Amino acid sequence: MSPSLNPAAVLIAHRGNAFEFPENTLPALRSALELGVRQIEFDVHLSSDGVPMVMHDDRLNRCAGLDRDALAMRKTELQAVSVHEPSRLGERFVGTTIPTLREVASLLQQFPQATAFVEIKRASLRRFGTDSVVQQVCSQLRAVADQVVVISFDLETVLLARRNHALPIGWVLSEYSAEAKHLAETHAPDFLFCNQDKLPTDRSSLWPGTWHWAIYEVSSLDEANQLIPRGVHLLETMQVRKLLHQLNTTSPSESQPQSTG
C-alpha cells in the first residue's frame, strides 16, 4: 500500500459501523466517526408527518422484526420502535431507536472534519413527491451544509438539491452503462457511486471526469486493492474496523494502489 494513502480518508462507513451496530443508528454512526473514519453514509426517508428520519427500508421487517409500513408512521411512532436488527444481532441492542436527521446532523457537528453522504430514498420520493422530500431533507442540513453531500439513485433529486440548495451531490448508479456515462458527463455530479458488482469485470479504468468515484460494498483488502488502481477514490464499507486495520497494516511492498490524492 502506498504510504500516501490515508485509510481514514478513503473509507466511507456505509450506514455507519453497520457490521458491529444496528445500521443507520446513532451508535453505528458515532462508532465509525470515533474510529477515525472521515466519511459516513446514511439513508433518509420521511415519516408520515414529514420529518426526515435516518433509516434504509420503507418497512420495518428487517431492522425491527415488525411487518409495518414505516412511511405510514409518524415521527413519534417511529421513534418508539426498537431497530436492533434482531435477526442479525439478536437482543444485544434492544431499545436502539431510529434517529431523526436533525439528531444525526447534531452528531456530525461534533466531528467537524467529517463528511456525510445523505442518501434520499426512492420510496419516499414516490410517496411524498420529490420537491417535498428534497425541501424537508435539505432544510435539516443547513447547519452542516459544509459537511454534507446529498446522494440518490434518482438523478433529478440530486440535481434539485444542487439547484435549490447549493449542496454538493452524488449520483448512485443503477447500472454502469453508456447512457449513465452520458448523463454523468452532462450533469457533472461531484460524486458517482456504484456497486462493485455492476462494474466491468475486465478491471478497466472507470470513466474519467470531474467527479470522484465511490464504490460499495467493499468488504476486504483484496477488493480495495483491485478497485483503487481503477480510479476509485472512496471505498464504501460496513466492515469499518476490519478494513481500517487491514489498510493500516498493509506494507508498501505488499500492494501498490494509486494514491487517491
Image (spheres, rainbow, N blue to C red):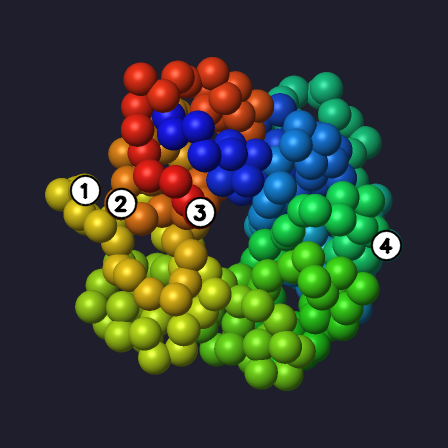
Task: Please provide percent x and percent y for residue 192.
Answer: 41, 59
Task: Please provide percent x and percent y for residue 99.
Answer: 77, 48
Q: Which amino acid does label 2 sit on?
A: Arg
Crowd class of label 1 (few under 14; some 14 to 19; many from 20; radius 10 Å) = few
Select label 3 or label 1 by which is in front.
3
Select label 4 or label 2 by which is in front.
2
Q: Residue beneath label 2, please? A: 230
**Inter-mark Cα distance, 4 to 2:** 45 Å
Q: What element carries label 2?
A: helix
Q: Which amino acid does label 1 sit on?
A: Arg
Select label 1 or label 4 by which is in front.
1
Q: Residue 76 bears which disc, if any?
A: 4
Q: Residue at 55% of width from left, 40% of height from top? A: 9
Q: What residue type is labelled 3?
A: Gly
Q: Residue at 47% of width from left, 16% of height from top? A: 249
**Inter-mark Cα distance, 1 to 2:** 7 Å
Task: Please provide percent x and percent y for residue 217.
Answer: 42, 39
Q: What element carries label 1?
A: loop
Q: Is residue 238 something that shows in the picture? A: no
Q: Residue beneath label 1, please? A: 203
Q: Residue at 42% of width from left, 57% of height from top? A: 212
Q: Mark 2–mark 3 contact, CB under 8 Å?
A: no
Q: In this view of the protein, which residue sits in the foreground, 137 or 258? A: 258
Q: Mark 1–mark 2 contact, CB under 8 Å?
A: yes
Question: Which of the marked residues, 2 or 3, is nearer the chain's N terminus?
Answer: 2
Task: Please provide percent x and percent y for residue 142.
Answer: 77, 68
**Inter-mark Cα distance, 2 to 3:** 14 Å
> Residue lying farthest front?
4
Quadrant of the rendered structure where residue 82 is? Answer: top right
